[in-house]
Amino acid sequence: MKSSAPYGWSLGLRARSAAEASSRVRQGFSAAALDRLRQRLDLSPEETAEALGTSSRTLARRRKEGRLGAAESDRLYRLARLYERAVEVFESEDDARRWFRLPQWALGDRTPLAFARTEPGSREVEALLDRIDYGVLA
C-alpha cells in the first residue's frame, strides 16, 4: 500500500509535493543527501557513481562543491523513492537493501539497482514492487 508520507522524507530530501520535489531536484541536492542514500543502500563509491550515471571522480568533485547537479539529483531522487518504496513493501531496511542487489526474473534476471538506472527501468522496478506489495506473481 502506498504511504502518505511526504516525498523523500526518510532520506532528508523533504518535499511536500511533486512540484516542490521537482524544484529541489533542479536546484540540486546536497552531497549529504547522497551520502545518506549511499549509506542506507550500503553502496560503494563506484556503485553509487554507476547508479547515478556518472563517474566516481565527478561525485568526488560534487562532494567538494557540496551540491549535486540537476541530473545527478534527479537520479538520486529516483533511487531514493524506489528505496523508500522497497522498505515500505518489505517492512525492513535490511530486506529492501538485499532485494535491490538480488537478480529478479521479472527484470530479466537483472538487479533492481541496475535496472533502475533509467526512467523506464525505474518505473518497471516500481511496478514490480507494487505487484509484490499486492501479492501478484512477481
Image (spheres, helix red, strand yellow):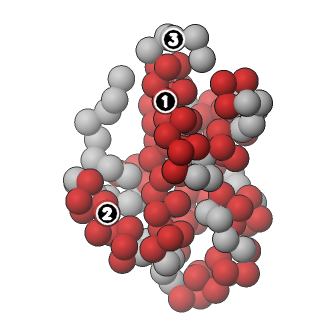
Question: Which three-letter amino acid code belongs to the residue tagged 1?
Answer: Ala
**Residue 102, above or below 6:** above
**Residue 11's image quarter?**
bottom left
At 51% from the left and 77% from the top, the residue drawn is 68
Question: Please, what secondary structure does the residue beneath circle 2 have?
Answer: helix
Q: CA distance from mark 2 to mark 3?
A: 31 Å
Amino acid type shown at disc 3: Val
Q: Earlier in the sequence, mark 3 or mark 1?
A: 1
Alpha-carbon distance for marks 2 and 1?
21 Å
Q: Mark 1 falls on what kind of element?
A: helix
- Sequence-wise first label, 2 or 3: 2
The quarter holding residue 122 reads top right
Residue at x 61% of width, y 63% of height: 52
Mark drawn on residue 127 = 1
Kindly indicate whether the residue at mark 3 contacts the one at mark 2 (C-beta within 8 angstroms).
Answer: no
Q: Are marks 3 and 1 in contact (CB under 8 Å)?
A: no
**At which x and y percent is residue 135?**
49, 11
Give the residue drawn at x 72%, y 38%: 111
* Residue named by callout 3: 136
* Residue 65, horizontal then vertical, whole percent: 54, 88
Q: Residues within 10 Å of mark 2 (few under 14, many from 20)?
A: some
**Residue with the mark numbered 2:** 22
Q: Secondary structure at mark 3?
A: loop
- Residue 86 appears in the figure: no
